Image (cartoon, rainbow, N blue to C red):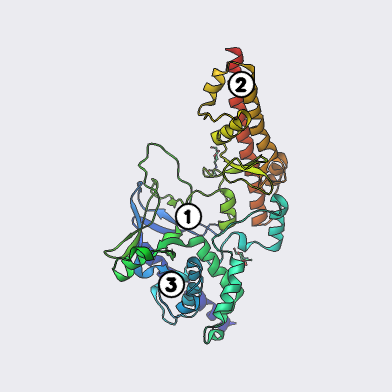
Amino acid sequence: MIIIGIGLLLFVVAGNKGNTEAINLLNSFCNNCIIEYYGEDKGYGIKANKNIVHGETLFKLPFKYMITSFDYYPWTTYFENSDQSFKLIPRLIYEKYVNPVYSPLKSLIDFYPKYYNGFYNMTEKNLQYFYSTFGENMKFESPIDCKVAKGYYFMKARKIPDIEKCSECLNDDVFMWACQAVLTRAFNFHKVNYYKLALHQNLPKEQNVPGSVLLPGIDVFNHYPRKINNNAISVRYDIQYAENPPQAIAKSDRNTVKGEEIYISYGPKTNFELAILHGFILENNSDDLQFIAVLSNINNCQNYEPVQKYCPFAIKKSVLNYEIINYLYNKITQKNTEIKDIYKEINDINNYQEMNNFRLVFQGYRNSIVTYKIYKCRKDFRESLKLVKSQEGKDYYEKLVDKLCYLSNLDSFKHLKVVDRVLLKGLYERVFS
Ligand SMILES: *[C@@H]1O[C@H](CO)[C@@H](O)[C@H](O)[C@H]1NC(C)=O
Ligand SMILES: *[C@@H]1O[C@H](CO)[C@@H](O)[C@H](O)[C@H]1NC(C)=O
């Protein structure tokens, strides 16, 4: 008993030591910020130690802690012709399980989460629930399909001499871990930057190719959409690469009050994308979109779907979509005029025919939301609300799917109200003023 106790104790202490080392290192790269644990679902994030303003430098990661798809390491030749973002997967496995040298970089890799939430973490039961809620033919586009990539990796990895001495290297779960780490954490990184940072040279222009990079620490910032504020200085979130010393620099894309978590935007992501890629959704996601189909027998729009014969449009819950109005108006009238202000147009109507055209436009718009939603939740608004309210006995992903369904219904409903309000207001002014 005593021996087991000591063994466990040592194990726990050793585990913590690794984390402490990684956290201390990362904190030393963080400007006025500190790594913070936000609980089991969310994991680590970064907290502001003082008020942070938009544009301020948050994090400087020295080049030696970056992992790029252009690096040379002992397995390079076995994966040479693979996709650039894929290349980071065997590299992670190599660094974590094969590289015999214990380095600070290794402690950063060991600090990566053991599990990633998202599509690949769902059980068969979760997936079935997901498909029964949103339909079987959900399209899911991802930079790497981890299931396909796994077969490819195993085929290539088996050619590495002595690979069987590393039991983790041919393990399904290990591969899925590395694949999800890369899928959720990699940034774009061009070869020109690799030359600049690693070799201190310029790259001949024609050889510049896009690649990928892992930026341990910079990937600890959690995602939250940026508030759209027209008066704000426009500092887009983007990693910058500097030469002296060679490093990656992350700047703040918003203001943050001392003590609050510092968020960055990973780019505009809908709740669907967040759910699949990262396993969470945001209640007030200003980047969220719903997709609707306007049926059409001919290809007369961008992104026409020739098989099911429709034009897809994206709607945001609170903004009238003029692309749809114009598409419908042009289709109905065969006129190539552009409508920019619907109130003005309605106000200028001076004959019955024109009035009827607008009625058809709004009928089409409305109908599409009600009837032809793409990725429509099969449960209606009331039913989905009920599901969200009574979630006893459901697991994490089932609750997530319920909430996704509810929010998707709610947002279409809100958009419908916007459309109806415009129409009513327009008609009211027209008829009664
Ligand atoms: C999903 O993550 C949890 C921990 O959050 C883990 O226990 C489980 O094994 C993971 N499942 C899969 C299929 O990866
Ligand atoms: C989302 O916004 C609504 C209304 O503005 C607010 O009541 C709610 O608390 C917000 N939820 C979150 C999680 O921020």
User: In front: mark 1 or mark 2?
Assistant: 2
**Residue 222, which numbered label?**
1
Q: Secondary structure at mark 2?
A: helix
**Residue 158, which numbered label?**
none
Seen in the picture, residue 5 relative to 418 is either above or below; the reply is: below
Q: Secondary structure at mark 3?
A: helix
**Residue 354, which numbered label?**
2
Dividing the picture into quarters, in which one does residue 277 lie?
A: bottom right
Determine if the C-beta at disc 3 is less than 8 A from ligand 1. no
**Amino acid identity at mark 3:** Ser
| Whole-number angstrom distance, CA of label 1 to CA of label 2 | 50 Å
**Is there any visible trace of residue 185 in the rendered image?**
yes
Seen in the picture, residue 417 relative to 269 is either above or below; the reply is: above
Q: Quick one: 351 or 400, which is closer to the camera?
A: 351
Residue for badge 3 = 107
Residue 217: image x %, image y %? 42, 62
Residue 178: image x %, image y %? 53, 69
Q: In the drawing, does residue 17 fall left or right of residue 386?
A: left
Q: Secondary structure at mark 1?
A: strand
